[in-house]
């Protein structure tokens, strides 16, 4: 990401206040930059948010609603000075995939369900804050996130092909949509295709000239002028149509909620919340680190929850922390939530006075904007890097992307969590343990398979993970193998616990069994570099009573010295 870390001018927010943590303290010199960044964000985010409504299946004006009350609520109650909250392609895609078949797209019932989902997501986010579930976001590895977002990107891009070509399209899955698009190729509307290609050319051309240029806004304004002047509708180009102006009345979604409906919507809400937790936390972390600032994940959870309450009560749909919008503000020089508040004011002006011209926007324009968003989510560079550095993890990312595309976004995010947990378990299940040996005047580690006694009769065995039920078999097997290491019968086997931060019930039982095994063979079980918390666990498990206090050593050299003193071997 672009940007440099400011020096002494960086101001940390005041954590004593329950609100405005993302704004205060205010640096007067930063105010103009934040306002310009807010104007830039509005120019880029307004067409993008309207485009996201095509992904979500919502009326186009609801995209503007996501940039008003929800964005303002997070700016006031969130802790991150940088995170921009609004409509997001991943959460919108999850919502649309989950609501398929439950209501007609963009119908009042569909909009009501979307509002209920936003309120359910808000409730889950606040519940996550109350019970401290923010850590759930940490269970999605970067590998599966890259695969997940790549799958979402391809799904989003495929869904816009019919809009780019001016054909009816259809189908509930990306594969079905693509198959229908291929069958309908003879029905292409050439004028629609020209409009779409022109929009893509303007956006990409503006980026080549200046990455900060509002290419999407230029394309939208140009398309409105051309559509009105040339009456593109007469050439078969589908237009957006009337966009309601003014502000929505704050009210609960008009949906009759019952246990059956709640049961159908809850898995969708949970899937969206997982994406919100992960994406928002990752983005906030990145920018807080860049500017040496602090932020609170817990406060952000409240801010995100309130933002989604705002979305649910104003007829919008679920909102999320957006990496792309956050980068837009950062690139334009914005450093506080004052930039986002500026954007909210501009969106308010658009809703009050400028919705009339929006009705002339060709659908192909928004399809082109969203198509580019989808393509940008496809992280080819990230996938290549994974393949080069961790080929095994590349297949994990690829499988995650494939599930998103061929099965569904909801299933893809659940698989992503499962794969991340399995990957973590696999690393702990087969920990890369080692044995310490002498190399000149220092100690070095070698794999257990190439183990040797560091002194005749002494083995130093380093366990490189928490000891828990899944790796107790590995622990037991390796210790028994080490008892066979020569040149002399093992008299002391010391486990270096420097990397062990937990010993669960199963592992403690295994250690007691190993103690008895070693004792039967005339050997002692000892421990070195044991953390205080782990030592307390060993005490409670009765292991200390078995091995005795003198079996614990603060450092490995102490083990060597004690062994030499007792045996006279060096």
Image (cartoon, rainbow, N blue to C red):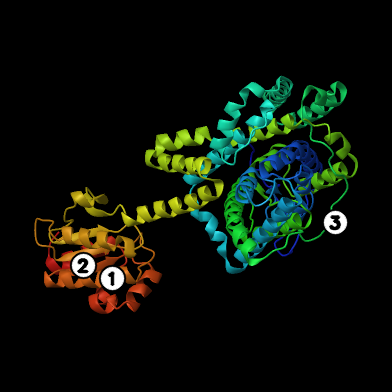
Whole-percent x, y for residue 22 in the image: 72, 54
Q: Are marks 3 and 1 in contact (CB under 8 Å)?
A: no
**What residue did someone put label 3 on?**
249
| Above or below, 354 relative to 444 | above
Furthest-right residue in this view: 353
| Above or below, 213 relative to 41 | above
Task: Please rate how many residues cluster around mark 3, counting C-alpha atoms within 10 Å: few if below 14, some from 14 to 19, many from 20.
Answer: few
Whole-percent x, y for residue 232 in the image: 81, 24
Answer whether residue 4 is visible to the viewer in this image: yes
| Above or below, 194 relative to 11 | above
**489 displayed left or right of 74:** left
Task: Tell which circle, 2 or 3, labels the residue nearer the N-terminal end.
Answer: 3
Whole-percent x, y for residue 291 in the image: 64, 47
Nearest-to-viewer mark from 3 and 1: 3
Cα distance between the residues tagged 3 and 1: 69 Å
Task: Tell which circle, 3 or 1, labels the residue nearer the N-terminal end.
Answer: 3
Number of numbered callouts drawn: 3
Task: Tell which circle, 2 or 1, labels the residue nearer the N-terminal end.
Answer: 1
Residue 497 in which image quadrant: bottom left
Cα distance between the residues tagged 2 and 1: 11 Å
Which numbered disc covers residue 562? Answer: 2
Query: Quadrant where the C terminus lies?
Result: bottom left
**What residue did someone put label 1 on?**
552
Residue ID at (27%, 67%): 527
Answer whether residue 529 is visible to the viewer in this image: no
Q: Nearer the viewer, residue 254 or 126?
A: 254
Nearest-to-viewer mark from 2 and 3: 3
* Element assignment for label 3: loop
Q: Nearer the viewer, residue 275 or 226?
A: 226
């Amino acid at each position: 990401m672009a940007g440099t870390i400011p020096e002494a001018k960086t101001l940390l927010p005041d954590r004593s206040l329950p609100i405005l943590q993302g704004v205060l303290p205010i640096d007067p010199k930063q105010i103009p930059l934040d306002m310009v960044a807010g104007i830039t964000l509005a120019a880029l985010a307004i067409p993008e948010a309207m485009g996201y409504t095509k992904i979500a299946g919502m009326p186009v004006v609801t995209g503007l609603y996501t940039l008003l009350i929800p964005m303002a609520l997070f700016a006031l109650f969130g802790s991150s000075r940088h995170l921009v909250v609004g409509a997001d392609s991943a959460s919108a895609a999850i919502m649309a995939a989950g609501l398929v078949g439950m209501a007609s797209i963009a119908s009042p019932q569909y909009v009501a369900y979307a509002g209920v989902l936003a309120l359910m997501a808000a409730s889950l986010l606040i519940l996550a804050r109350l019970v401290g579930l923010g850590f759930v976001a940490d269970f999605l590895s970067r590998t599966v996130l890259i695969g997940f977002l790549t799958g979402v990107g391809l799904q989003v891009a495929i869904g816009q092909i019919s809009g780019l070509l001016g054909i009816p399209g259809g189908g509930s899955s990306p594969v079905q949509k693509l198959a229908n698009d291929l069958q309908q190729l003879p029905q292409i509307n050439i004028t629609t295709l020209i409009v779409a290609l022109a929009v893509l050319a303007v956006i990409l051309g503006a980026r080549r000239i200046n990455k900060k240029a509002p290419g999407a806004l230029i394309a939208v304004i140009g398309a409105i002028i051309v559509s009105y002047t040339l009456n593109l509708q007469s050439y078969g180009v589908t237009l957006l149509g009337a966009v309601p102006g003014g502000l929505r009345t704050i009210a609960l979604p008009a949906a009759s909620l019952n246990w059956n409906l709640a049961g159908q919507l809850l898995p969708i809400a949970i899937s969206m919340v997982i994406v919100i937790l992960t994406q928002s936390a990752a983005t906030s972390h990145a920018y807080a680190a860049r500017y040496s600032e602090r932020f609170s994940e817990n406060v952000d959870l409240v801010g995100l929850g309130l933002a989604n309450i705002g979305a649910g009560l104003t007829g919008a749909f679920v909102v999320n922390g957006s990496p792309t919008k956050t980068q837009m503000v950062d690139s334009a020089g914005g450093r506080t939530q004052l930039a986002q508040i500026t954007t909210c004011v501009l969106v308010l002006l658009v809703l009050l006075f400028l919705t009339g011209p929006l009705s002339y926007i060709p659908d192909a324009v928004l399809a082109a904007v969203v198509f580019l968003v989808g393509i940008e989510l496809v992280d080819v560079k990230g996938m290549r890097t994974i393949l080069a550095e961790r080929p095994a993890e590349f297949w994990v990312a690829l499988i995650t992307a494939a599930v998103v595309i061929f099965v569904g976004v909801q299933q893809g995010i659940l698989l992503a969590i499962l794969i991340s947990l399995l990957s973590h378990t696999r690393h702990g299940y087969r920990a890369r343990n080692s044995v310490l040996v002498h190399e000149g005047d220092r100690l070095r580690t070698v794999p257990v398979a190439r183990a040797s006694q560091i002194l005749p009769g002494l083995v130093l065995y380093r366990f490189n993970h928490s000891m828990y039920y899944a790796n107790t078999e590995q622990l037991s097997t390796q210790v028994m193998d080490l008892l066979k290491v020569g040149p002399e019968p093992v008299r002391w086997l010391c486990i270096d616990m420097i990397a062990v931060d937990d010993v669960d019930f199963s592992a403690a039982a295994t250690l007691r069994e190993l103690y008895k095994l070693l004792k039967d063979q005339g050997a002692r079980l000892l421990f070195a570099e044991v953390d205080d918390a782990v030592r307390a666990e060993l005490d409670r498990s009765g292991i200390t009573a078995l091995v005795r206090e003198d079996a614990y050593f603060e450092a490995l050299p102490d083990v060597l010295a004690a062994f030499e003193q007792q045996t006279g071997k060096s």
